[in-house]
Amino acid sequence: MIRRILTFLGAALVTYVLAALLASNSALDSIVALGLPISLGQRLSANVHDLLGMATSFLPLVVIALLIAFLVASLAARRLPGLRLPLFALAGAVAIVGIHVTLKLTFDITPIAAARTAGGLLMQGAAGAVGAYLFARLQPPGVARSPDAS
């Protein structure tokens, strides 16, 4: 049980870090495209700032979305065990894209600028897919125990 929780938290953290760094660097690339130079130090500083700054808002959403996605993927994988890894990856991608779509439809906001474009939204989904795939690889499928097992 502890291993499963730690694996889940690790997968959520990987997803969050990838999504936040993709968002941060997308915004920085937009600034560079305007002709303004950004040094490596400024880029690193912005990345750290965004990782810390989004931890109180975006990270909890990622954890909740992945928890729901992994529950659904686990149920689906019981019926389709040969597709377990792609099912989890798909669930992770849908979870992160779902955060952005839900915020847009519910509150008419897109707090992560990168998610305002199809490419940026796809990259956010890729972050979810990577984290979920990692979870599925590190966490073996549940094994049914007999009531007598200790």
Image (tube, helix red, strand yellow):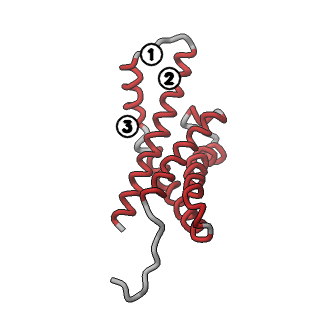
Q: Earlier in the sequence, mark 1 or mark 3?
A: 1
For label 3, the crowd category at 10 Å Cα-Cα, with few meaning under 14, some 14 to 19 and many 20 or more, is few
Q: Which residue is mark 1?
A: 38
**Secondary structure beneath disc 3?**
helix
- Which of discs 1 and 3 lies nearer the camera? The answer is 1
**Secondary structure beneath disc 2?**
helix
Identify which residue is drawn at 47% across, 46% down. Answer: 15
Residue contact at pointers 2 and 1, CB within 8 angstroms: yes
The outermost residue toward the front is: 82
Residue 49, relative to residue 6: is it above or below?
above
The answer to whether 62 appears left or right of 94 in the picture is: left
Residue 147 in percent (x, y) is at 41, 87
Residue 116 in percent (x, y) is at 63, 34
Residue contact at pointers 1 and 3, CB within 8 angstroms: no
Q: Earlier in the sequence, mark 3 or mark 2?
A: 2
**Secondary structure beneath disc 1?**
loop
Q: CA distance from mark 3 to mark 2?
A: 17 Å
Look at label 3 and name its amino acid: Leu
Identify which residue is drawn at 57% across, 33% down. Answer: 114
Q: Which residue is mark 2?
A: 28
For label 1, the crowd category at 10 Å Cα-Cα, with few meaning under 14, some 14 to 19 and many 20 or more, is few
Residue 37, relative to residue 69: is it above or below?
above
Residue 43 in percent (x, y) is at 41, 23
| Mark drawn on residue 52 | 3
Look at label 1 and name its amino acid: Ile
